[in-house]
Image (cartoon, grey):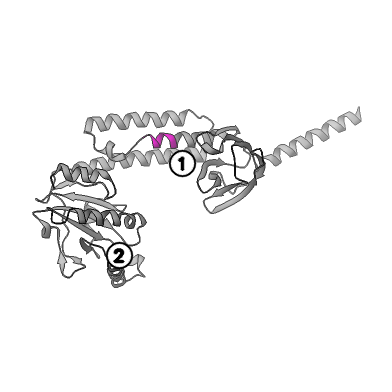
């Protein structure tokens, strides 16, 4: 009897220790059909934290630890990536087709609902389409659309009742930020909408010499590109912008690029910021009217520009045609130009 009791106590202690130990790491396993890669890399915000070998049949199994509960990246190559929410104590299995990465994934096991939720959120965000189309709706239609979207996002959120508190808080905050953006931008667009007098800029340095103001271009349409030399997306639009400038040369339109290069990104010197802009324009042989705003940010503030590039189209009378016009690389821009008979 004593031996049986001792054995039972020993088993309970072992089970207790095993359960406690399991909370210290994550178990990750699964199988990828049609896989041609040899390892899985798990990465966090600071970079890779774990590599896991993939067997010839596509199966994998390993454990890892994370510093904190957060969204990580599960990937087998540069083009095959999927989000994965991890927290020590989770036991997650992932099965799917490596040729249909992420879209075919099935998550199961303890903690898997967090990753399922993230995928559902991503799918919903992709289905939104171009935010500009939502912002172009009339007030009644816009309000109805936002109310529907809020219900749909809430439905996704409430479909998972065992989400980790950190993820729940993050998703709630992000949803709020998205709808705040839509509502504030919509209100701003109405104040700065089509037909309204455009805010003006004055005495901006001209690359070719002298100063230019918005009034310098009255009588012509003005397509404004607000950009900076450090902005990658801005630079990628330059070839398309130059092509447009060439195509619409001698038409009733001026292409005006306003650089927002400033001292903080130029060693603390405004002289260095201006030189950086001038050197860049010269090196890239940029055409059109090239201006530098210098210390004056009133035009940016008036249009509430918080990200670049930003494109604005103004009519010959100085009124707004589109305060958030299509980019040069967007075919809709030429459609807009043609509709105005430029």
Element type at mark 2: helix
Left or right: where 320 falls relative to 68: left
Magenta segment main secondary structure: helix
Measured as percent of width and height from the top left, residue 199 is found at 16, 53
Segment tinted magenta in the rendering: 122-127
Measured as percent of width and height from the top left, residue 291 is found at 21, 63
Q: Are marks 1 and 2 in contact (CB under 8 Å)?
A: no
Residue at point 40%, 32% (across, down): 153
Was residue 126 drawn as part of the magenta stretch in this picture?
Answer: yes
Q: Which mark is residue 151?
A: none
Query: In this view of the protein, which residue sits in the foreground, 102 or 274?
Result: 102
Query: What residue did someone put label 2 on?
Result: 284
Q: Residue furthest front?
A: 247
Residue at point 35%, 35% (across, down): 128
Rendered-image quadrant of the N terminus: top right
**Number of numbered labels in the structure image:** 2
Q: Earlier in the sequence, mark 1 or mark 2?
A: 1
Label 1, label 2: how far apart the Cα atoms are: 42 Å
Q: Residues within 10 Å of mark 1 (few under 14, many from 20)?
A: few
Measured as percent of width and height from the top left, residue 224 is found at 21, 54
Q: Which mark is residue 170?
A: 1
Any part of residue 4 in sight: yes
Query: In this view of the protein, which residue sits in the foreground, 233 or 110?
Result: 233
**Above or below, comparing residue 242 to residue 84 in the picture:** below
Left or right: where 285 falls relative to 48: left
């Amino acid at each position: 009897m004593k031996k049986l009791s001792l054995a039972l106590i020993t088993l309970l202690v072992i089970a207790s220790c095993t359960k406690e130990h399991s909370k210290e790491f994550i178990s990750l396993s699964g199988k990828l059909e049609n896989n041609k890669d040899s390892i899985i890399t798990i990465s966090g915000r600071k970079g890779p934290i774990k590599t896991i070998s993939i067997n010839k049949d596509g199966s994998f199994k390993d454990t890892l630890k994370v510093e904190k509960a957060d969204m990580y990246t599960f990937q087998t190559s540069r083009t095959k990536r999927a989000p994965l929410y991890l927290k020590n104590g989770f036991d997650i299995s992932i099965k799917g087709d490596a040729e249909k990465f992420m879209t075919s994934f099935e998550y199961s096991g303890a903690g898997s609902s967090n990753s399922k939720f993230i995928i559902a959120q991503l799918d919903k965000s992709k289905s939104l389409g171009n935010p500009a189309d939502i912002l172009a709706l009339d007030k009644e239609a816009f309000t109805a659309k936002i109310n529907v979207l809020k219900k749909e996002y809430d439905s996704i959120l409430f479909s998972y009742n065992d989400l980790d508190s950190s993820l729940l808080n993050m998703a709630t905050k992000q949803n709020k930020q998205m709808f705040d953006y839509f509502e504030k931008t919509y209100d701003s667009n109405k104040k700065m909408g089509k037909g309204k007098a455009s805010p003006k800029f004055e005495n901006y340095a001209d690359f070719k010499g002298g100063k230019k103001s918005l009034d310098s271009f009255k009588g012509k349409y003005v397509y404004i590109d607000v950009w900076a030399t450090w902005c990658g997306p801005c630079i990628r639009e330059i070839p398309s912008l130059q092509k447009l400038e060439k195509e619409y040369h001698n038409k009733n339109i001026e292409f005006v690029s306003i650089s927002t290069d400033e001292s903080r990104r130029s060693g603390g010197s405004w002289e260095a910021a201006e030189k950086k802009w001038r050197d860049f324009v010269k090196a890239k042989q940029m055409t059109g009217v090239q201006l530098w705003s210098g210390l004056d940010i009133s035009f940016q503030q008036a249009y509430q520009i918080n990200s670049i590039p930003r494109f604005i189209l103004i009519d010959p009378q100085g009124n707004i045609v589109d305060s958030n016009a299509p980019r040069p690389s967007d075919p809709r821009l030429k459609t807009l130009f043609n509709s105005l008979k430029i």
